[in-house]
Amino acid sequence: MRPPTPAARCTTGTARLGNPGYDDVLLMFSVGQVPGKLECFADGGSTMVRFVDDTGPEWSRRYRAMSTERLALTDPAEEVRIAFAERFGREPEGIWAAPGRANLVGEHTDYNDGFVLPLAIDHRVTVAAARRADDRLRLLSLEKGERELTLSDIGPGLVEGWAGYVAGAMWSLAREGVEVGGLDLALTSDVPVGSGLSSSAALECATVLATRDLYGGPGDPGRLALIAQRAENEIVGVPSGIMDQMASMACIAGHVLLLDTRSLVAEQVPFDLDAAGLTLLVIDTGVSHALADGAYAERRRACEAAARLLEVPALRDATEADVAAAADLLGEVLHRRARHVVTENARVLEVVDRLRAGRLDAIGPLLTASHVSLRDDYEVSAPELDTAVEAALRAGGLGARMTGAGFGGSALALAPAVEAGAVTRIVTAAFAGRGFRAPTVFAVHPAHGARRLA
Ligand code: GLA
């Protein structure tokens, strides 16, 4: 017998939840009309709702409260499988997942052929998909709704919003010579959008992997990451580097990924937070400043101009001494931009040395130095990010920095696990004191890269 699903045969109920984060929230929910009851309880900081049935243990399921209207199964793979079957009237051919990422250090170095050190986070896009005999794409996002288009509708700037990442990924794979046909696809994502955690790369990578498995294409994660990046660059129109897609494709659990973005040679570096008694907190500021896209492209152009003046193929090939010696030639702004890139590359390699030496607890100052360089030399921070970093350090953090492109999004704080609560409290209070909206603070763990689940 099939268990009840959130979408099936609905009745409505209410529950008052005791979780501190949800105090006084009355949740409305729907669930299958079957004998049994819903039990609500707090679990590891998130509110869980469990369907308890009298007729047998196989009907027992755990749901998480997604919003005041919606419950979701706690297993996203099961959730997209059921949603796919209900919407498209058949079973999917497979289920795939790809994570978002946090970048430990190595910011704005990837489009300078430099080094980055990201980790996949335990937030991901999960897709269920099956081929179609025609060229239609029927896309269902459990968070954003439905879109329908044909393969011939896909081109630069033609597909708006989230569907552009999915369609772009398929388009890009087809550019490799793969005969890509239509697809029915259902997806769910718990990667926060606009938080600098690469929700878009996760969407591209999950789609590339699913489409590759169904229609063929390369096996190498590096090639697949380039295919996903091409979707972002050409279809969505964002001139991003390769870090996010490589992190989503190639990371493995318990490690950070040392990536040489010139050669795409990647090395997994052990990153065992638990063994070190540490936690890595994401502080999502909830803001995304409007100038982000234009400023990103402008920084890229500045780096290319600096490399030309220094007569090197890319800033990766310059040293700190080269940049210092060329201060007059570069001028004030390009000098600072180039200085950030060359010092950031050095910081990545130094962090890796300390990690290899088992000194995870000694990388904090390098993370904070990265933030200072991004704030002062590269000028891509924001008041909310600076506040997050300052407050996290004051609260006992070992190191903290903005992560991702900047101008908002998220900061990372490395802290003793026992200080996680203090960091959250003090950062939240600092935001309130400055009149900023409350940040969302959560721990991340180095997770698996993109893979097929079923
Ligand atoms: C964004 C881009 C990446 C990288 C970072 C900055 O996340 O997508 O390629 O350039 O910004 O490090």
Image: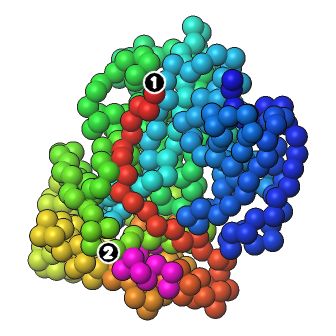
Residue 411 within the magenta-colored segment of the rendering = yes
Q: On the rendered structure, is 281 left or right of 165?
A: left
Colouring method of the image: rainbow
Q: Name the quadrant containing residue 56.
A: top right
Q: Quadrant of the N terminus?
A: top right
The image position of residue 314, as x and y in percent, is 21, 57
Residue 379 shown left or right of residue 349 in the figure: right
Task: Look at discs 1 and 2 and give the one toward the viewer.
Answer: 2
Q: Position of residue 390 (x, y in %)?
A: 45, 87
Q: Amino acid at mark 1?
A: Thr
Quarter of the figure that contains the C terminus = top left
Q: Please name the residue that numbered disc 2 is placed on.
A: 277
* Amino acid type, residue under disc 2 in the picture: Gly
When the figure is inspected, residue 369 is found, relative to residue 212, above or below; the finding is below
Tell me, yes or no, whether the highlighted magenta stretch contains residue 327: no
Q: Earlier in the sequence, mark 1 or mark 2?
A: 1
State left or right for residue 177 relative to residue 139. left
Mark yes or no: residue 262 visible.
no
| Marks 1,2: beta carbons within 8 A | no
Q: Secondary structure at mark 1?
A: helix
Which range is magenta?
Answer: 410-422
Query: Residue sitting at 30 percent across and 48 percent down?
Result: 252
